[in-house]
Amino acid sequence: MSAPVIPLASGFSPAARADWLALVAKTLKGAGPETLVRRTIDGLAIQPLYAADDSPAPFTPARGDGGQDWDIRAAVADPDPAGANAEALEALAGGAASLLLTVDDGAGRGARLSGAEDLARVLEGVVTDVAPVALDAGFVGPLAAGWLDAAAKASPAAPLAFHLDPLSTFAAAGASPGPIGAHLDAATTAAVALAETYPRASLFLAGGQVVHEAGGSPAWELGFAAASAVAYARALVAGGLPIAGAFARLTLGLAVDAEPLAAIAKLRAARMLWARITSACGVDAPARIEARSSRRMLTRADRWTNLIRLTSAGFGAAAGGADAIVLGAFTDALGPADAFALRMARNTQLILMEEAHLGKVADPAGGAWALEAQSADLARAAWSAFVAIEAAGGAAAALETGLIAQAVETARRALADDIAARAIRIIGVTDFVAAEAAPDTAPTIAGHAPPGVGQPGPDSLCPPLTAIRLEDLAP
């Protein structure tokens, strides 16, 4: 026998905006409701109240076929190939579904590999057909892609992610060993050679994280990722791939931080931006998004609070529809992670997936007036940033002229001002300051770059997008 429905709202008059405004005016003692409006780093207004007429028609992003769990991607970055192999096997045994292998390209982070044998050692015991491997190899990308091809033994079923991304590497370093155009050509040659062998593989990563980590705003992060995607699609088409196949082989790389609603809006805006670009190109290819937790949000002081930040980031990425999520370790601000920190990074995602069931709804924010409106506002701002980058000649040219660096610097100053004004609060740093001193950070490891990374010709230069930490902006 079904339980009776109790009409809790019966007897109450429908709520109207005018009624709410009257209560606000009474509470604010004469101040207008506009005093409750807040603005994002991009200058976008966040209203105190949203209703149906404030929201555009719902845009429903899809993760895979819709409503499926995401890919728990574990970061592997031990400098020693044997140590990296132990990390990889432990991650997969502990619940990770795929791996993100960082290869040191001279920056001093990641596995120090000199050739295919070293990468094969890292992946010893890893079945790439069922445990996808993604690369983060910087300017070593084309070499590392060939090494991964050898390790995968040309298995066509392997859903590899070669993640070639010379533009982000150039942006972070401020220089390329040889012309950046030559690096893009080398990456394209490698990608086209691998495309037929691995029909399920992602070839390029159009990453916006470099903008975020340097202090950039969400709109410019999305705009740079979109401009990179267009640059890589053009390169693949010039290399012989059909335009639909080119877009289908790209992955968007975005950062998610401790503001889960903002992360949801960013990922939804990314899909709107992608849909507009692919539609203009006559292509029907759903966006594929890899979300990585923000490094700039992590603190050295009171490092345990990073567990909450990472959980919030994972929630935002999952609810926002990321296809793959990489959560960092809560000790990343201090140096290489130990086994406990890596396990916590995996377990956080497992709880969000297996206990909170966040992957079971394709678009949890769909129909939420506030998030629909904020997603659309951010998508429009990101489109403006994308148009500005394209007008400057594309992503590489916009980096070289300093257009992107200038936008990042403006946002970084705004972040610092908000932290100083306590509009942004950092637990353990600006609020509830940790009683214990932050541990010393690990010493910097000298970079190791395999031979053959440079390209003939003069180096390209741009103002570097140097990574920051929000705690360092605190007065």
Image (cartoon, rainbow, N blue to C red):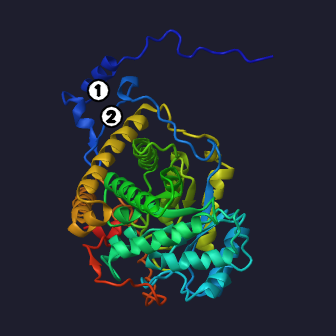
Q: Do the residues bearing badges 1 and 2 touch, measured as CB atoms within 8 Å?
A: yes
- Residue 142, relative to residue 32: is it above or below? below
Q: In which quarter of the image is the N terminus?
A: top right
Identity of the residue furthest to the top in this view? 11
For badge 1, the amino acid type reads: Val
**Where in the figure is residue 419, as x and y percent of width and height?**
28, 59
In this rendering, does residue 87 appear at all? no
Q: In this view, does 454 lie to the left or right of 61?
A: left
Q: Where residue 337 is drawn, which disc sits there?
A: none
Query: Which residue corresponds to mark 1?
Result: 24
For badge 2, the amino acid type reads: Pro
**Residue in the foreground of this view, choosing between 278 and 137:** 278
* Residue occupying image coordinates x 46% and y 87%: 452
Identity of the residue furthest to the left in this view? 30
* Residue occupying image coordinates x 62% and y 53%: 70
Element type at mark 1? helix
Q: Where residue 48 is drawn, which disc sits there?
A: 2
Q: In this view, does 389 lie to the left or right of 105?
A: left
